[in-house]
Image (cartoon, rainbow, N blue to C red):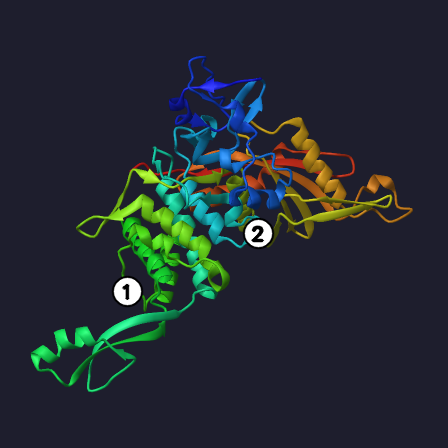
Amino acid sequence: MMRYPVDPITLTQAHEWISLQHTEQGSVDLAGVVGLKMDHPWRQAYAKADDPDYTDNPCTLGLHWSLGTIKPSHFIGAVNLPFGNEQHSLVVRPRDVLEKQALVDYGAMFASVLAAPSSVTGMELNWLFGCDPESESIRAYDLPQLTLLEVTAFLATTAHFVQRHLRQGFVQVRENLTGRVRGRILIAAQIRENLVRARSERMVCAYQQFNPDTLENRLLKAALEVCSRWIVSLPHPPPQLQYWVWAIRAALAPVPEYRPHPRDWSRVRKKGLMAAYAQPLALARLVLTRLHLMPDGQAEESDQTLPFFLDANRLFEGWVGVCLNRVCTSVRGQEWRRLDLLGSSYKFRPDFLLKENGQQIIVDSKYKPDGPELQDLYQVIGYARLLATPAPIGADCNQGMEGLREACLAIPGQLEANVESALEQFVNAWAARYNHSHCWADEFRLSMVNVPLPKARVQ
């Protein structure tokens, strides 16, 4: 039986795609964790996206065998791994090659992707990010923009949620009314507060009122306020965050501020008509685990976080969609296509299909700072040829195929000062991509574009 013992400390110092150091004195065996199959919402959402065979598992941050070693894949995050009756934390940071000393602003990229239409980026939040509110918390190691990722996920999700799914409920109200009675009279309270003080005109009553002041909405409001106060402390927060704060605050205006209690999470309703609350409440709990209010009312980061993951590969893919949307009027991401051939139907899904000057272009993103591999060239060329419109019968074959005449690979590029600067530089890089392209005799072109990334500001 193959074993792979490692020191538990090694698990807290992992990086994307870097093998975990094998040691004979290790106290935990990773070999049994790699093939672990868990009935977990993260895994189900990921499988529905484009991994139906469960070959990439976000529950273990992509741990897999590679040339006799075990390494994570393209997930960043922190999770608890089961080793028999024990659990140990696995913390994965971005790989050093792309990270470049933790200067890439993953938080700003994440906010930009979530702010863009999903039809453009091809991304949904569940494909990019997940948290587990029912698991034990993990020590919040120094991950790049950890808090910003969590705050961004909560604000983006809740801003969308309050537009369609915010609900009111029957709330128990206790009030000392003057000259009238409503609901039922609280006899003991009436004697204590009114009769012994000779205030016969008043009546202590309890009644139900239909309003948005429910426990679920109070928890969302609590997470909103702690996020808002934390954002103020940032030197250069992504502008999308404040827009989302305003939208949520307007919707939750009738809900009073509230200080959550640990037992509140077992009392919330997340099924039936309240099923839409499950995701925003999970992210609210994530935020309130990571942030808390100090006595002066300011937000402070704690040393704990709930288990979470961020798919860095899909984050880059969504960022490519944001960049392409700056240079093209029509960008469609992650749309399934079908090819019928000899009675069989084949489905495939290119990253992006866009139109520029009346011509269609296939763009395939590759999260590979060292450049694409040969199989990546085959893939993008195959997508383009499969989607092209065949030439009319009898036409000269040298005229090639009509419609789709270019395939482009998008890879990580240089760092820029901020998101806006990165988008501006992408416009120039996109215009100059033909300087380093290959064109065939039929005028079909294979090009490559370096996608600039925003640089994180050091506080």
Residue beneath label 2, please?
Answer: 120
The residue type indicated by label 1 comes to Pro
Q: Is residue 94 visible?
A: no
Q: Is residue 138 left or right of residue 408?
A: left
Residue beneath label 1, please?
Answer: 256
| Residue 292 x, y percent position in the rendering | 27, 47
Q: Is residue 236 above or below residue 278?
A: above
Residue in the picture at 67% in, 39% down: 407
* Residue extending farthest right: 394
The answer for how far apart the CA atoms under marks 1 and 2 are is: 37 Å
Residue 119 marker: none
Which quarter of the figure is the C terminus placed in? Answer: top left
Front position in the image: 415 or 152: 152
Residue in the picture at 46% in, 49% down: 112
Q: Is residue 272 left or right of residue 409?
A: left
Front position in the image: 5 or 346: 5
Front position in the image: 145 or 44: 44
Near mark 2 (Cα within 10 A), the count class, few <14, some 14-19 or many ≥20, is many
* Residue extending farthest top: 24
| Residue 428 x, y percent position in the rendering | 53, 42
- Which element type, helix, strand or loop, lies under badge 1? loop
